[in-house]
C-alpha cells in the first residue's frame, strides 16, 4: 500500500468516525461574569465538574460553554481566591440558557472542593508555563514568543536576527517545536539570521506556551535538547487586532458562530528587516520581504467530536546587493581595518506550505482520541555570485600622529569570489494518533506516528580566495579553489514512531506523581530501531492544605509557601534528519546512527509570598552524557555537520530563576545559567609545543601530535544571565516599560583551515539590552480613553516606542577568514546590528 492510498484510507476512516459520533448532542450556557461592583472579570476559569471541558471569560466578562444535554450539570467559576459552584438542571439538546454570575472578593475555603477537575493535570508535568500576556507589547526583533523563549533558563541565542536558539549545550536542530501537536521544521539552507525570515509561530494566535529544557516526557518526539509546546486559541467570541511598526505589520481575527460550533482563527504578517540590516558593516541594498498567512478552523460535530483544519503559507525572500564594507577590530594597541568593495548579489527564497486536518474525540469520562494528517512542503533556493576585493590594514592609533586613524601598514590585498546555485525541495507527510485516558489515580497516554519524507537537493557552490593578486592553475583546465561542492541528492524514506506512558498518583496528601514512558522509533533508510525509556517524578512536600497544620494555625491563610521537587531521567535519541546526513562535500552517509543523550535532571520549584504576592524560585541541576554524537561547526546560524557518529561528550550545569510580579499585575523574571559542554572526537589531534611555544619534532623532523581529548563544543557558553522586567511609570498606571537584558560569556571558535585549532579561541561576550515604553491610549476593560463613540469600538489601543541594543554594543556572530601577504589567516568579525529605534501601534477590537 503506497502512502497516497493509506492517506485516503485514513481520511475515509475519520469521516466514518465523525458520522458515528454525530448523534450525541449538547446544550449551551452563556452570560457574563462580574464582581460585586458590576465590573467585568477577565480570565475567570469555568469548567464542568468531572469533565475536561472548560473555558475562560473574555475581557468583557462574557463566556460560553457547551454542557451535556438531558442531565444535571455542576459548573465551577474560579477567579483568584474565589470559587463558586452552580448547579444547572437538565437542558434539552440545542437549548441555550443565559447565566450571569457575580463573584465576591471574599475567600471561602469551604467552596474550594475541585479534586475531580481533570484540567489540573498539567501540574504533574515538570514544564515551564510562559505567561502569554507578556507578548502583547514586548519589544522584539523577531517573533515575540521566540524573544521570550530566549530569556528562559538554559536557553541561549547570540543573535537577535534569528529565531533559532540552543538549549543546555545543544544546537538549533535539537529542539522540538509543536503547534497543536504538529511538529514544526526550520529552514534547511539558511546561513545567516538576516536570511531566515518569519518563523511559523504567530504570537497573536497563541493561547498557551509550555517549555522544557530537558528531561521531558515520552509523548514528545525524538530530539536531544528541548521541547516548545504551543497551543493556538479556540475562540468563543469575536476579536480582532492589528499592529504596525517600522519593521512591518500583522493582523488577526478570531471568532465563532452563534451556536459556538464553528470557530475560526486567522493571522497574517508582513515584515522587512531592511531597517535593521542597514546598521550592519556591509553597506548595500537590502531588500527583504517576509510574509505569511495562517489559519485554524474548527467545527464541533457534536459535544464530543471536533474536526479542525490548520493551514499555513509562508514566503520569505532576501536579496542583498552589497557595495562595500569597513570593519575595524582588534585591541587598543593593534587596530586592524578590513575594507572590501563588492560586486554581485545574493538572492535567497524560502517558500513553505503546511496543511493539517485533525479529528478529536473527547468525552466526559476523560477519554481523548486525536487523529492528525498533515503535509509539509518547502521550496528553498539560494543563489549568489559575490566578488570582493579587500584590503587589510593596520590603523595608526597614535593621537599625536599626522596619520592618526589612517593606514599605518598594509597587511594584505586580495580577492574572494563566492558562487552558489543551491536548490532544495522537501515534502513531509505524516499521520499520527494520540490518545489519553484519565483514571482515578493515573493518566494513560499513547501515540503512534508514520512519516514519509521526500527530499531533493541540488547543491553546487564554490569559493575562491586569492591574496597574491593572481591564481595559479593546477593544470590548464582547472583552477585552485578554496572549496568546491557539487552534488545531487534524492532521498525518500519512511519513519515510524510511537510512545506509551502513564502518570501515577502515588500519594494524594503529598501530591506525589510518577510518569513512566517509553518511545520507539524505526527509520527504513538505515534500518535502525531504537527504544528510549523516560521517567519524571514530582513530589510536593508542602501544599496549601498541609501548610496551615505545619504552622499550627489552621485559621491563618497568609502562608502560601509550596515546594515542588522534580526528578527526570531518560534516554533521548535523535535519529538523523537530512542536515545531519550530509557532510561538507554534500555526500550522504547511509551508515549514520541516531545521536544519543542520557538526561539526569534534579530540580525544585519553591512558591513563597513576598509583598503580598506569590513568587516562584526555580532550581534545576542537570547532567547529559552524549554518545554517538555527530560533531559540527556553526557559521552564523548555519550548522556544518561532520556526518559521522565519531564523538562522545557531556553537558552539565545549573539553571536558576526567580519569577513573579515585582509590580502588581505584571509578571517578570530573572535567571542565571551556568553550563559546560565538551566532546571527544575520534582520531583528532593537536600539535605538541615546547616551553618556548614552538612545535616539537621527532628524529625525522616530523611534527609530534597527540590526541586532543575533550574540547569545548561550539555551544559551550559557561555563564548566561537574562532579565525580563515590567513596570508602570510612576503615578501613571496606563504607561509601562519593558526591559529585556541578556549577558552571555563568549562562545568558542577557531580557524576552519586548521583542525587542530578547532574551538581553541573565544568570541566576544554577548551583551544586549532592549527597552520598550508603552502607553495605553484606549481600554474598554479599564473604561479609559473611550469617551468618544468611535473609540468605544476598540478593546484596547497601545502606542509603543522601542530601543533595540540600547547601549550600542557591537556583538559578534562569526568570523570571515582572509589571508595577508605572508599567507597568514586573519579572522575578521561579523558584527550584529547596532542601536535602532522602533515605534509600534497595537490595536485590538
Image (tube, helix red, strand yellow):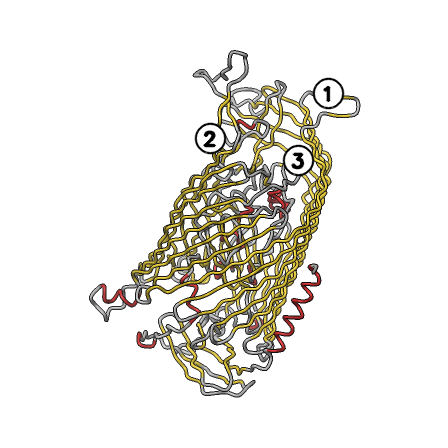
Q: Position of residue 581 (x, y in %)?
A: 62, 42
- Near-viewer residue (780 or 259): 259
| Cα distance in 3D space between marks 1 and 3 | 23 Å
Residue at 64%, 70% in the rendered image: 13
Q: Position of residue 808 (x, y in %)?
A: 51, 41
Name the side, left or right, on which 532 lies relative to 419.
left
For the residue carrying disc 3, how many other residues have a C-alpha within 10 Å: few (<14), some (14-19), or many (20+)?
some
Q: So how many labels did they put on this image?
A: 3
Per the image, the residue denoted by label 1 is: 472
| Cα distance in 3D space between marks 2 and 3 | 26 Å
Q: Position of residue 118 (x, y in %)?
A: 43, 70
Asked if 69 appears above or below 263 in the picture, the reply is: below
Q: Secondary structure at mark 3?
A: loop
Q: Tell me where residue 262 sits by quadrant.
A: bottom right
Q: Quadrant of the N terminus?
A: bottom right
**Label pair 1/3, CB-CB below 8 angstroms:** no
Which is nearer the N-term, disc 1 or disc 2?
1
- Near-viewer residue (5 or 561): 5
Per the image, the residue denoted by label 2 is: 709
| Cα distance in 3D space between marks 1 and 2 | 38 Å
Which is nearer the N-term, disc 1 or disc 3?
1
Name the side, left or right, on which 108 lies relative to 715.
left
1 or 3: mark nearer the eye: 3
Residue placed furthest toward the left: 552
For the residue carrying disc 1, how many other residues have a C-alpha within 10 Å: few (<14), some (14-19), or many (20+)?
few
Per the image, the residue denoted by label 3 is: 585
Q: Is residue 594 visible?
A: yes
**Label pair 2/3, CB-CB below 8 angstroms:** no
Name the side, left or right, on which 616 lies relative to 590.
left
**Label pair 1/2, CB-CB below 8 angstroms:** no
Asked if 18 appears above or below 291 in the picture, the reply is: below
Q: Is residue 137 visible?
A: no
Amino acid at each position: 500500500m503506497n502512502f497516497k492510498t493509506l492517506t485516503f484510507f485514513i481520511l475515509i476512516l475519520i469521516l466514518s468516525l465523525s458520522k458515528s459520533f454525530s448523534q450525541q448532542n449538547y446544550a449551551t450556557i452563556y452570560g457574563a461574569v462580574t464582581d460585586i461592583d458590576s465590573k467585568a472579570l477577565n480570565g475567570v476559569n469555568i469548567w464542568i465538574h468531572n469533565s475536561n471541558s472548560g473555558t475562560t471569560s473574555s475581557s468583557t466578562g462574557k463566556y460560553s460553554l457547551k454542557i451535556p444535554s438531558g442531565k444535571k450539570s455542576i459548573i465551577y467559576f474560579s477567579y483568584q481566591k474565589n470559587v463558586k459552584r452552580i448547579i444547572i438542571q437538565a437542558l434539552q439538546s440545542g437549548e441555550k440558557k443565559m447565566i450571569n454570575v457575580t463573584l465576591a472578593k471574599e475567600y471561602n475555603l469551604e467552596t474550594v472542593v475541585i479534586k475531580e477537575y481533570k484540567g489540573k493535570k498539567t501540574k504533574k508535568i515538570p514544564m515551564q508555563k510562559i505567561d502569554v500576556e507578556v507578548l502583547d507589547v514586548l519589544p522584539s526583533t523577531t517573533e515575540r514568543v521566540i524573544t521570550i523563549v530566549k530569556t528562559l533558563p538554559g536557553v541561549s541565542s547570540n543573535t537577535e536576527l534569528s529565531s533559532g536558539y540552543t538549549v543546555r549545550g545543544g544546537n538549533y536542530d535539537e529542539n522540538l517545536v509543536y503547534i497543536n501537536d504538529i511538529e514544526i521544521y526550520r529552514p534547511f539552507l539558511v546561513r545567516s539570521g538576516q536570511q531566515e525570515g518569519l518563523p511559523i509561530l504567530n504570537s497573536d494566535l497563541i493561547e498557551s506556551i509550555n517549555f522544557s529544557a530537558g528531561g521531558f516526557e515520552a509523548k514528545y518526539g525524538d530530539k536531544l535538547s528541548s521541547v516548545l509546546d504551543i497551543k493556538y486559541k479556540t475562540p468563543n467570541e469575536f476579536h480582532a487586532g492589528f499592529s504596525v511598526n517600522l519593521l512591518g505589520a500583522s493582523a488577526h481575527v478570531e471568532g465563532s458562530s452563534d451556536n459556538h460550533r464553528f470557530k475560526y482563527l486567522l493571522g497574517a504578517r508582513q515584515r522587512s528587516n531592511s531597517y535593521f540590516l542597514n546598521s550592519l558593516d556591509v553597506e548595500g541594498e537590502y531588500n527583504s520581504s517576509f510574509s505569511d498567512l495562517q489559519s485554524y478552523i474548527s467545527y464541533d460535530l457534536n459535544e464530543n467530536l471536533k474536526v479542525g483544519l490548520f493551514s499555513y503559507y509562508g514566503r520569505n525572500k532576501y536579496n542583498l546587493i552589497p557595495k562595500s564594507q569597513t570593519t575595524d577590530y582588534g585591541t587598543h594597541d593593534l587596530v586592524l581595518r578590513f575594507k572590501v568593495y563588492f560586486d554581485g548579489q545574493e538572492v535567497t527564497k524560502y517558500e513553505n506550505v503546511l496543511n493539517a486536518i485533525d479529528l478529536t474525540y473527547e468525552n466526559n469520562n476523560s477519554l481523548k482520541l486525536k487523529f492528525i494528517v498533515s503535509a509539509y512542503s518547502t521550496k528553498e533556493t539560494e543563489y549568489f555570485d559575490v566578488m570582493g576585493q579587500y584590503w587589510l590594514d593596520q590603523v595608526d592609533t597614535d593621537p599625536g600622529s599626522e596619520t592618526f586613524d589612517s593606514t599605518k601598514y598594509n597587511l594584505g590585498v586580495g580577492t574572494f569570489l563566492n558562487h552558489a546555485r543551491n536548490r532544495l525541495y522537501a515534502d513531509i507527510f505524516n499521520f499520527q494518533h494520540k490518545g489519553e485516558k484519565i483514571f482515578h489515580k493515573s493518566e494513560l497516554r499513547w501515540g503512534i506516528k508514520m512519516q514519509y519524507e521526500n527530499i531533493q537537493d541540488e547543491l553546487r557552490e564554490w569559493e575562491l580566495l586569492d591574496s597574491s593578486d593572481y591564481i595559479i592553475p593546477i593544470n590548464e583546465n582547472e583552477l585552485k579553489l578554496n572549496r568546491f561542492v557539487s552534488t545531487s541528492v534524492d532521498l525518500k524514506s519512511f519513519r515510524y514512531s510511537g510512545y506509551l506512558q502513564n502518570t501515577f498518583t502515588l500519594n494524594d496528601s503529598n501530591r506525589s506523581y510518577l510518569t513512566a514512558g517509553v518511545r520507539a522509533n524505526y527509520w527504513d533508510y538505515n534500518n535502525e530501531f531504537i527504544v528510549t525509556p523516560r521517567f519524571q517524578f514530582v513530589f510536593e512536600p508542602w501544599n496549601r492544605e498541609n501548610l496551615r497544620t505545619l504552622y499550627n494555625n489552621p485559621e491563618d491563610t497568609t502562608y502560601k509557601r509550596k515546594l515542588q521537587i522534580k526528578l527526570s531521567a531518560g534516554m533521548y535519541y535523535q535519529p538523523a534528519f537530512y542536515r545531519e546526513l550530509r557532510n561538507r562535500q554534500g555526500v550522504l552517509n547511509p551508515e549514520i546512527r541516531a545521536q544519543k543523550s542520557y538526561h539526569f535532571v534534579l530540580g525544585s520549584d519553591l512558591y513563597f509570598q513576598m509583598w503580598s504576592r506569590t513568587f516562584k524560585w526555580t532550581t534545576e541541576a542537570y547532567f547529559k552524557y552524549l554518545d554517538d554524537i555527530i560533531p559540527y561547526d556553526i557559521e552564523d546560524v548555519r550548522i556544518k555537520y561532520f556526518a559521522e557518529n565519531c564523538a562522545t561528550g557531556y553537558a552539565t550545569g545549573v539553571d536558576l530563576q526567580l519569577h513573579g510580579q515585582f509590580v502588581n499585575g505584571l509578571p517578570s523574571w530573572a535567571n542565571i545559567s551556568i553550563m559546560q559542554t565538551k566532546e571527544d572526537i575520534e582520531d583528532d589531534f593537536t600539535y605538541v609545543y615546547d616551553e618556548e611555544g614552538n612545535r616539537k619534532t621527532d628524529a625525522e623532523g616530523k611534527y609530534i601530535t597527540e590526541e586532543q581529548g575533550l574540547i569545548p563544543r561550539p555551544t559551550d557558553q559557561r555563564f548566561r544571565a537574562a532579565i525580563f522586567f515590567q513596570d508602570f511609570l510612576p503615578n501613571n498606571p496606563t504607561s509601562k516599560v519593558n526591559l529585556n537584558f541578556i549577558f552571555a560569556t563568549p562562545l568558542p571558535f577557531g580557524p576552519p583551515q586548521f583542525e587542530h585549532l578547532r574551538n581553541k579561541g573565544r568570541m566576544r561576550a554577548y551583551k544586549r539590552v532592549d527597552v520598550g515604553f508603552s502607553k495605553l491610549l484606549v481600554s474598554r476593560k479599564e473604561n479609559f480613553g473611550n469617551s468618544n463613540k468611535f473609540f468605544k469600538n476598540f478593546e484596547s489601543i497601545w502606542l509603543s516606542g522601542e530601543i533595540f541594543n540600547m547601549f550600542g554594543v557591537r556583538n559578534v556572530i562569526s568570523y570571515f577568514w582572509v589571508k595577508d601577504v605572508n599567507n597568514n589567516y586573519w579572522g575578521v568579525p561579523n558584527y550584529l546590528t547596532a542601536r535602532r529605534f522602533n515605534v509600534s501601534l497595537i490595536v485590538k477590537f
